[in-house]
Amino acid sequence: MEALTWTGSLGGYLNPIFMILVGLLIIALVAQMVLGFFAPPQTLQANPDGTIAATAGPLGLAETGVKWLFLATLTVVVAYIIVPLVMPYGSAGIIGEMSKRFLPVWVALIALFAVSIYYKRKLGLYGKLFDSTIGMIGFALVMFWVFTALFVGVFDWIGTHDYLSQVSGLKNKVPGVPVPEGTEGAIPHYLLGGDNLARDIFSRVVTGSVFVIAIAPLATIFAFMVGITLGLPAGFYGGKLDTFLSFVANLILAFPVILLFYLLVTPEIVQTGIPSYMAAFLFVFPLIFFGVLLNSRYYTQPAKRNAILIPVLGILGWLYLSIINQKGTVIDFLPAWMDLFDISILVVFVSVVFVNAPTVFRIVRGLTLDLRTRDYVAAAQTRGEGAWYIMLWEILPNARGPLIVDFCLRIGYTTILLGTLGFFGLGLSSESPDWGSTINEGRKLLLIYAHPALPPAVALLSLVLGLNLLADGLREESLKD
Amino acid sequence: MGLFILRRLGVMLLTALCLTFIVFWLTNLAPNLEKLAKTQGNARMSDEAVVSWLENRGYSQALPVKYGQWLGVLPGYVIEGADGEVRARCQLPGEPVEDASTFCGILQGDWGYSTVFKDEVGSIVATRLGLTGKLMLCVMLVMVPGALIIGVLAGMREGSRTDRSLSTVSIVSTATPEYVSGVVFISVFATATFGMQWFKGTATSAMDDATFENFFLPVITIALYGMGYIARMTRASMTEVMTAQYIRTARLKGVSFPKIVLRHALRNALIAPFTVIMLQFPWLLNGVVIVETLFNYKGFGWVLVQAAGNNDIELLLGVSIVSVFVVLITQLISDIGYVFLNPRIRIS
């Protein structure tokens, strides 16, 4: 087997075109920037026949140039992705083969976008997202990794080799290296090369997405539950409760995050059981939240309330007990048949929730302070609604806009935090394929072999960037109302 | 105003006490102490040996007592160990026990002794803080003007193409954590992979002699992450000012656009970013830890990692005190500065 080049035979045609287009695009962009400061503004001219014509001038010319050059460059990029799908194995190079591996993701993305754009007027805020280019790009980046994680985690599709198996002779080999005869795997190449322990980097990166996509949103949801359950009363009642809770929140926020991680996420601390107690404390908040939410709504109809509340609390309680109950830690009382799952990285999960919750608390508290002076709150109070009903069913729905935007941003921040933990080798096993640990592995030999650290870095960057762009698009669209 | 500052100082002191107590408690948990005994004494110590080692060195006292001693409000221990040797907390190396002072804690200016570096914590923190100060100064010099220029340019014409492209740039920079940009910069600009080996991949030599070649990458790595956030805040504040009535009046008077931006808008638009820049310090501390580890620059962040990794209790406490005070003082400065800069706010 020969080693793969980056673009294969396709590159012979596309690479020169791509280079020229990118060069022209950069020139046009610079020209437009410079002209934007010096060129006279557009002027309108009245024609003798009564119509008005705008002369574009050099600035307009540059803008049109940028637009078309950008579209042309985009077409070439799409060609790099699409054309290899119909080419035989090995002829389209590394990029072509990666594009083929991601085929299920492309199909899912196209299907999702087609359906969403078709029905966008019926889909509320989600549908409005498809009116903003920035939001769509962000959503595409996020969904790319969500689908990747789904297909890798559930069907084991995209990865080419086992992410843990080491193949002798492939240590630190450059991208596109052929594997020796008889190695197990979907294709006979390491697409992005081998890492320090001769494992396939491509497979490790796509497997790492499962970890991030599973943990980051879940941890953010828990942080939001804690922040909302505490922030609403703090903002609504004010007084001593507010002073105390704000003091505690500021206390946690004054800690440098890395110091906190180094203190909390060590094997010694796990031994003492502190993470288990913290989990028991933090994860009870969803229970309280849903309990109060449903009770405040239906307490005038006890029969209906019991019919809803008992199953909900029962299921949540069972999930809660299974999460905090872990073999070999201080909280280990459930019989094995009741314990649904064991989270091996409970300490990572807990500390990420712990770090995020105070910020959410502050945001919710600030929003509540603002919203409690509104007329509809006064109206609800006059109607004789309870305090918790007002907080959860009047104030919270009206605070959803900023909260949804912050939720997207916070998933990105959580991803960065998880990467930080991996980067310092805290709480995760060194074999773990998550992106932070892989960057940490790769950076040790960075000055000699640059290729193992780059793919996870780019992956993490693209996911966080996608979340930030998505949040920006959502903010823009929700402000338009 | 005076009362406001006094109250803030009081809260600050309380926060610092709580935080150091938490650090003290976490570092003094039984498994951590056992690890300390085994790394300092003998890795194959029996359990009894560990217990007596800890007892001899005062680690087995009650937590509040230990904390009081460290703080300097309780007299330091004098313990006659099981091995017959008498040890005192305040004893300097080689000094007889009788000459040791009664109190030695933070309040007396005695920060303790680092078990990893075998040196006084105070002097370690001072030298490392100096090195990090140099790094931070460079970061600030790059980050603050850069962010303000980007923010003002983007915010002066909201919705223009300059605005959209600069906003995208700042979103990209906030989405790039230091360990990602650092890795990318090193592999692009410090290795031969892409043929652009312009800078050095380590900053160890920059500790004595910082040059553009060895110091630029760490500085730009930290600066980029914070820059986007400040730029977005500046942009938001600038767009708000540009829609204000007095700007419209100035335009209607026929004042030229550059003059409006520089004379009328700029000063008012820079109030909000001031707060953001001050509150950016705690974030920068994270960046410093990551970048110093990545570029092997042995400053404050590097010491934090070493102290935490080896459970060097007194060094870790010293480090956390300094970092917590940095955070709290910047918060205080940002509050006070905001009141001074913004005449619309009065605190009674």
Image (spheres, rainbow, N blue to C red):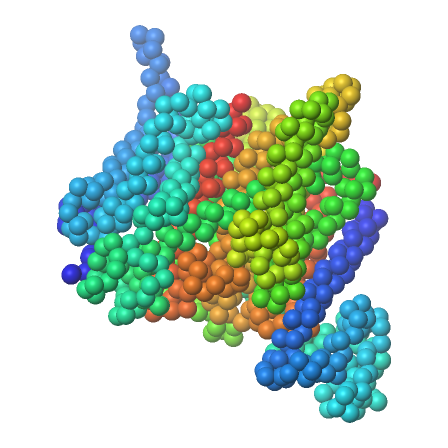
**Horizontal side of residue A390 vs A133, given as left or right:** right
**Residue toward you, A233 or A188:** A188
Residue A96 lies, in percent from the top left, at 23, 48
Residue A166 seen anywhere in this rendered image of the structure: yes
Residue A124 lies, in percent from the top left, at 49, 24
Q: How many marks?
A: 0
**Horizontal side of residue B14 vs A297, given as left or right:** right
Can you tell which quarter of the image residue A386 is in? Answer: top right
Residue B204 lies, in percent from the top left, at 48, 73
**Horizontal side of residue A303 vs B145, given as left or right:** right
**Residue toward you, B95 or B328:** B95
Residue A6 seen anywhere in this rendered image of the structure: no
Can you tell which quarter of the image residue A297 is in? Answer: top right
The residue depicted at 51 percent of the width and 40 percent of the height is A408
The residue depicted at 79 percent of the width and 42 percent of the height is A241
Residue A200 lies, in percent from the top left, at 31, 60
The residue depicted at 52 percent of the width and 33 percent of the height is A475
**Residue toward you, B97 or B27:** B27
**Up/down of B255 relative to A153, above or below:** above
Instruction: Give the position of the C terminus of chain B as an image quadrant.
Output: top right
The residue depicted at 57 percent of the width and 28 percent of the height is B243
**Up/down of B109 relative to A350, above or below:** below
> Quick one: which residue is furthest to the top in this view?
A49
